[in-house]
């Protein structure tokens, strides 16, 4: 059970903004004083104090069964950030057998199949796979987990795993599975929500089957965590990119919060809360990465030590 409170989020934004000011990013006295005044007003608002909500915590399989109904609808802000980079890498690879791991609704399975690849796709959610099969009927779909892929050793030329590792607690077993199924010289492309984005609330929210608010269990992986997990199983890093949310370079005008700031519906938290403290939200999130994209390769030859792990 989780307890989410809009006031806690708003104060967190103000705190992040003040920390950046203390570090010298925004050293103007007026900026600091405006943040302190915002905090005073937020803490004095009785309506904000009473707006917290209890959230259930659901696993990724159960959560994506629900999310499959709306996953591809407009509004998933991560797609425009990671997709151009992932497609650029994938489209440069020769045609072969490609794994779409945690394929979701089949975004990449469909693209790869249309480019002539022999696509095998795996997901733990039967509901997601049903949507994916309709989107890419030419691909071969299987139920399975990232920690135990239903594929033979050295059976694919490339693998892609998009926006899924947020829901994995430990990266190393997953990286070991990717290294196992890749052929020597094979490529691995991973995209995921950045640890910064998770910290600022980029966590799927949905209504559980009980009707209660829920969040899908999510974990923050720092950029170096992927490299360390991949290196342990012999995967070589070729590239890493960390695209940012496109925020304007100029600080927004701080509008009055009003007597009763509207926190809106819990399904829209936290993004609809940013307008209550626009300057703090802008300062806290400016130039922070939103997603991370890694490109790895399995070398043509592996050391005996690495082979013993696979």
Image (spheres, rainbow, N blue to C red):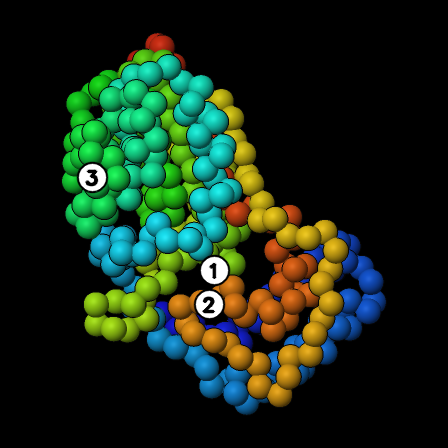
Q: Which residue is mark 3?
A: 133
Q: Is residue 231 visible?
A: no
Q: Is residue 174 left or right of residue 259?
A: left
Q: Which residue is mark 1?
A: 201
Q: Is residue 4 left or right of residue 8?
A: left
Specify the quadrant that holds the N terminus: bottom left
Q: As rendered, which of 298 and 263 lies closer to the eye?
A: 263
Q: As rendered, which of 226 and 141 lies closer to the eye?
A: 141
Q: Earlier in the sequence, mark 2 or mark 1?
A: 1
Front label number (3 vs 1) = 3
Per the model, the C-alpha gap separating discs 2 and 3 is 32 Å
Residue 181 on image: x %, y %: 25, 23
Q: Residues within 10 Å of mark 2 (few under 14, many from 20)?
A: some
Residue 240 on image: x %, y %: 52, 31
Indicate the secondary structure of the residue bearing disc 3.
Answer: helix
Look at 73% across and 60% down and name the residue there: 251
Look at 32% across and 56% down and name the residue there: 70
Mark 2 in CB contact with mark 1 (< 8 angstroms): yes
Specify the quadrant that holds the C terminus: top left
Front label number (2 vs 3) = 3
Q: Residue furthest right?
A: 29
Q: Say which quarter of the image contains residue 164.
A: top left
């Amino acid at each position: 059970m989780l307890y989410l409170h809009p006031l806690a989020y708003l104060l967190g934004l103000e705190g992040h903004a003040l920390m950046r000011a203390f570090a010298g990013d925004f050293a103007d006295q007026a900026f600091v004083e405006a943040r302190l005044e915002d905090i005073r007003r937020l803490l004095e608002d009785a309506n904000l104090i009473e707006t917290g909500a209890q959230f259930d915590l659901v696993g990724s399989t159960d959560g994506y069964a629900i999310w499959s109904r709306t996953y591809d609808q407009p509004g998933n802000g991560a797609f425009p950030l990671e997709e151009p980079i992932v497609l650029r890498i994938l489209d440069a690879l020769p045609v072969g057998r490609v794994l779409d791991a945690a394929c979701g609704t089949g975004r990449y399975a469909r693209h790869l199949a249309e480019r002539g690849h022999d696509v095998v796709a795996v997901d733990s959610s039967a509901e997601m796979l049903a949507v994916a099969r309709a989107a890419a009927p030419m691909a071969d779909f299987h139920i399975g987990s990232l920690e135990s892929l239903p594929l033979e050793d050295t059976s694919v030329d490339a693998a892609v795993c998009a926006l899924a590792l947020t829901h994995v607690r430990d990266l190393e077993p997953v990286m070991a599975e990717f290294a196992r199924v890749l052929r020597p010289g094979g490529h691995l492309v991973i995209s995921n929500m950045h640890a910064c984005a998770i910290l600022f609330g980029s966590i799927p929210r949905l209504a559980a089957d009980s009707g209660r608010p829920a969040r899908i269990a999510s974990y923050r992986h720092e950029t170096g965590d992927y490299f360390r997990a991949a290196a342990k199983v012999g995967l070589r890093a070729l590239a890493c990119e960390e695209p940012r949310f496109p925020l304007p370079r100029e600080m927004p005008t701080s509008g009055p919060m009003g007597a009763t700031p509207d926190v809106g519906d819990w399904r829209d938290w936290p993004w609809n809360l940013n307008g209550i403290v626009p300057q703090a939200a802008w300062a806290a999130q400016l130039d922070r990465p939103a997603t991370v994209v890694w490109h790895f390769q399995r070398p043509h030859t592996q050391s005996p030590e690495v082979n013993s792990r696979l």
